[in-house]
Amino acid sequence: MSSPDDAGRTAGRTVLTVADLHVTFPSEDGPVHAVRGLSLDLVAGETTAIVGESGSGKSAAALAIMGLHPPGVRVTGSVSLSGTELLGTSDAVMSRLRGNDIAMVFQDPLSALTPVYTVGDQIVEAIRVHNPGLTAAAAATRAVALLDLVGIPDPALRARSYPFEFSGGMRQRAMIAMAIANDPAVIIADEPTTALDVTVQAQVLEVLRRAQAETGAAVLLITHDLGVVAGMADRVTVMYAGRPVEHGTADEVFHRPLMPYTVGLLGTVPHPDAPDRPLTSLEGSPPSPLTPPPGCPFAPRCPLATALCREAEPDPARPFEAGHEVACHRARDVRTDRLTYDKVFPVPRISPSPLAGLPRAERDTVIALHGVRRHFPRTSGSVFRRRVGTVYAVDGIDLELKAGETLALVGESGSGKTTTLLGILDLAAPTDGRIVVLGKDVSTLDRAARTALRRELQVVFQDPTASLDPRMPVFDLIAEPLDAFGYEPGRIEQRVDELLDLVGLEPDHVNRYPQQLSGGQRQRVCIARALALEPRVVVLDEPVSALDVSVRAGIVNLLADLQGRLGLSYLLVAHDLAVVRHIADRVAVMYLGRIVEDGPVADVYDHPAHPYTRALLSAIPIPDPAAERGRARVLLAGDPPTPAEPPSGCPFRTRCPAFAQLSEDQRAACVQDTPGLDVVHGLNDHRSACHYTGLIPAIRGLDDDAVWPRPTA
Amino acid sequence: MTAPATVAAEGPQTARRISSRRLILRRFGRNLPAVLGGGVIVLLIVAAVLGPHLVPWSYDAIDPGAYLQPPSGRHWFGTTQSGRDVLALTVHGLGKSLLIGFLVAAGSTGLAAVIGTSIAYIGGWYEKAMLWVVDLLLVIPSFFLVAIITSGSGESAWIWLVALLAGFGWMLSARVVRALTLTVKEREYILAARYMGVSTPRIIRRHILPNISSLLIVDATLNVGYAILAETGLSYFGFGVQSPDTSLGTLIAEGARSATTFPWIFLGPSAVLLALVLSVNAVGDGLRDALDPSSGSGGRA
C-alpha cells in the first residue's frame, strides 16, 4: 500500500462529519422522511456501526454521504470530509471523491461488479480513474497486490477471472480490494456480509479489519446484525424511524443501553453461549415514515411510554453522559432503576410439551431418512443433451425426527440442507435410499395417499412475502389448504378464526392483504396456514432469517409455544446458529451433502467433535463486545468445494485445519476413506464423522478455547 | 441494502391506505395522453352505439339525386358516389371496426393466457409440442390466409375475420405469458400451494392468472389497435368486411380512389380511424406505466 499522503490520516482524527442530515424521498402519498437529523463523526482508524431495522434510514444515510441519491431526493444538513462540504457539490466533484477519498462496499457483490470485465480490469479501472498518470502495467501489478492483500489465493491468475467465476465471499473480497485501492479516508460498508454464510462472513470481516489496519481509514459499517456490530464496532449508532436514538461506544451501548428500543433489541437476540436466556419480543413495527406520530416514534411499542412520550418527540440523540448519547424521555429511569430487557419487556410464556417426560427412544418416529441420496445430472449441449457429470447434492444421509422434538439441519449454502428438505416435502422417491414419513415409505405412495399425507406434513418458508400470494387477502390465504381438502365454508370460517387466535393475529386481519401486514405478521399468517390442517410435522425452512431482528424473537417464541401446545415435530433448516441453539433439541451438521456431526444440541454446541462444527460455531458472532474480544477463531480457508466434484475420502479435508497438521500417514485415511458417523467417546447419542475425533480437541487452533470465548474476569 | 423504494414501502400502513385499484387509477390519471385517449374511446363507443339512431340517414339508404355531394347541412360529411350518407356509413363502420377490435383482442389474449400459462406450468412434452405449434403459426403468412378465407364468405365475413385474426394473433403474447409464468411458477407461494395439496388447474386459476393480469390487460388493449388496423388493411384490399356491410377499412378503400377529387369520402373515416388507434395505443401505454411500479409515474418530494 502507498503511504498515507494526506493530513486526514492520523489515527484518532475526525475525517468525516455528518451533521443534522435529512433525506426525503418522493412517493405516491407525499414525501417520505427516511433520515431525520443524523449526526456522526467518523474517526480515522475506528469503526462506527449504524444499526437499525429495515426502513430505519441507515442505507439512505449512507447513500446521502456518498452523494448517490437520484435528483428527486432531497438531502439537507451537512456532510464534510476533512473540512470540505460535500452536500450540494456537483456530481463531477463527487465522482473525484468517490472511490478515492470515500469508498463503498455494497451488500450484493454480484450486482456491484460488472459481469463483462475481469475482476482485475475492474480494480485497474478503479485505480486509474483517480491516478491517470499510472501506467496500465503498474496499475495491474497493484491490482494483483490488492487481491493478495484481501486473501484471494493465486491473485495473479484470479485477476483474469470474471465475477461469475468467483464465489460470493471472493467477490466481496474483490469489492473490498477495489474499495481500498486508492487508500480512502472513509470506507462505507453497507451490510457487507448479509448475503454470506457464517464461515465466509467471518473471513470477510477479517479482511475488512485488515483493510482498515492497512489504510487507517474510518469505517462506517451498516448492518442489522448485532453480533457483527459487537465484533467490529468501536462506536454504535442505533437508528429508529430515521432518527439516531442512541449513540455511544460499543461497550456502553451493549452493556448499559439507555433507550428502551436498544434494550429490547438486545433482548431479542439469542446468545449462542447462553441458550436458556429467554428472548423478549418487540411486538409491532416502526411507524409509517409518511405519517409519523406526534410523539416518540417508538412510543407505540414501548412499555415504558408515558403521556409525554406520546406527545413530544425527544430531540435526536443528545449527550446523556460521557461517550453516550440518547434520544429518550425515560433514559434517566432506565439507568437509575437498572432496567434490563427482561424487566422492560414481557418474558414469553412457552407451553411445555406433553411429551416432555418421555425418553426419546420411546417416542414415535415421524420422519426417517435411511441412506438418502439425491443426485442431479449435469448436462451439456443444447441440441443433443448429454450427461457430463453428476451433482452429489445429498450423498447418503440418515436422519430421525421423533414426535415432539425439533431437529435442525445446519451447514453452509450448498451443503444440501434445502435439497434434503424439498426431497422430503416432494414425497417422491430419492435417487437412492428410503424416506419414511409417519411410517409410510414415500416411494410406495400413490397419488391419493400422497395427497392424504400432505395433510400431516406442512411447511413454512423463509420469506413470508414471497410465500403469500400478494393478490389474496389473509382469509383466503389461510383458508386455501382447508378449501383444497374440501372443508365446508362454515367450518372454514370457524377454523380461520381459531388459527388467527392461535398465532396471535387479530380477527380483523382477515380483510388485509399481505402487503398491509408487517413482516412478523406475514410470517404468522404462513404459520397459521401451515397449521390449518392440524399437521403432525411442520418443516421450517429458515423461518426467521428474512425477518427484521426485532420481530424474530416473537416468531421463535411462537414456534416454541405452538410446539408445546399442539405436540408438533419440527424439522428446521437454519443458518443462524444462535437461533438453532435456542429452539432445537437435536442438530445435524451438513457438509457437501453429508452429515458430519449430529446429536443433542447442548452436546454438539458445548463439545463439538468435528473440526467443521468447531469452525462453524466459532464463526457465530456473539452479540457481546467483551465476549467477542476474548475470542480466538477457527477461520476456514476458502469456500466449500462444488458438490459436482467432491474431494475423495473425507469431503472436508480440503479445508480442514486439522488435516494440515496431521502427519503424512495419518492423512492417508482422510484421502482414501470417507469417514462414517461414529459415537463420540463418552457422550451418548452424539456422533461425528471424522477419522481423528479423539485428536481434535488437542490440535492447535482447534482446541476448546477456540470455540467459545474464555470467561473474562 | 435498502433501496429507496423499499424504505418507502416498508413502513406499516397504519394511516390512510389506498387500494391498489385506486392507486393504479391515480397513476393512470397522471398520464394526460392516456386520459384523453380513454375519453376519445368512450366518445367513439357512444357514437357507434347511439349514432345510427341520431343520424337522419341509414347507412344503406340512398339519397336519390345527391351523388358525390360535398358536406352540407343535409349531409354533414357529404355523400358517396352511390348517394349514401358518409356520416351514417362512418358511424356504422366505426361500430363494426370496434366490434371486431374488441372481440379479436378478447379472443387472442384469452388464447394467449390459457395456452401460455399451461405450457409453462405443465411443461414436459406438452410444452415442447405447443411451442412447436406456436412457431409454426408464426411462420404462416396469416394475411394471405385470412384474405383467401374471408373473401369467399359474404355476409358472415366479419365473423370469420374475428376468428382468424384472433387465431393468428395470440402466439407472440403466449410466448411472453409463458416467460412470465415461468418466473411466477418459481415463487414460493406456488410451491407452498403445491405442498398444501392444491391441484394444478386451481393453482393456475387462483395464483398464476391474477399475478400476470397486468400483462394481459395491456396486451388486450394493444391488441384492439392491432385488430382494427389489420381489419382496415384487409378491407382496404377488398378481403375483409364485404359489401353491403361496411367498416372503416372498406370506407377508406372506397374513398382513397377519389381522395384528390372528392376528399370528404376519405377524410371522415380516416380521421376517425386515426383517433381510434391513437387513443387505444395511448391507453395501452398508460395502463402499462400505471401497472408497472418501476415506471416513473411517481409523486414528488
Image (tube, coloured by chain):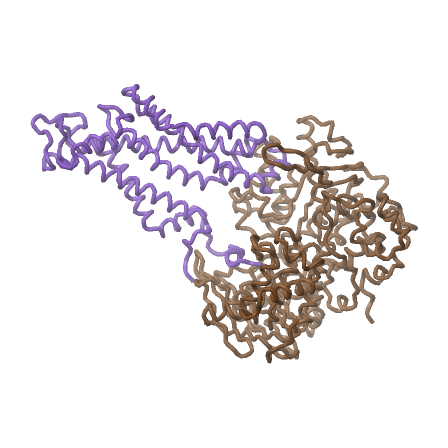
Chain colours: A brown, B purple
**Side of A266 relative to A670 (left or right):** left
Picture residue at 60% right of the left edge, 30% below the top: A486
Picture residue at 62% right of the left edge, 79% below the top: A13
**Side of B27 relative to A628 (left or right):** left
Q: Residue B283, located in which quarter of the rendered image? A: top left
Picture residue at 52% right of the left edge, 47% below the top: A512
Find residue A562 and report its horizontal and vertical position in percent: 70, 46
**Side of A455 relative to A23 (left or right):** right
Residue at the right extreme, as displayed: A682
**Side of B89 relative to A310 (left or right):** left
In front here: A3 or A649? Answer: A3
Find residue A144 and report its horizontal and vertical position in percent: 66, 62
> Image height check: is A134 above or below A437?
below
> Image height check: is B114 above or below B18?
above
In front here: A475 or A207? Answer: A207
Residue at the left extreme, as displayed: B65
> Image height check: is B196 above or below B83?
below
Q: Is residue A661 visible?
A: yes
Tell me the quarter of the image containing the N terminus of chain A. bottom right
Tell me the quarter of the image containing the C terminus of chain A. bottom right
Find residue B76 and report its horizontal and vertical position in percent: 13, 37
Q: Is residue A328 visible?
A: no
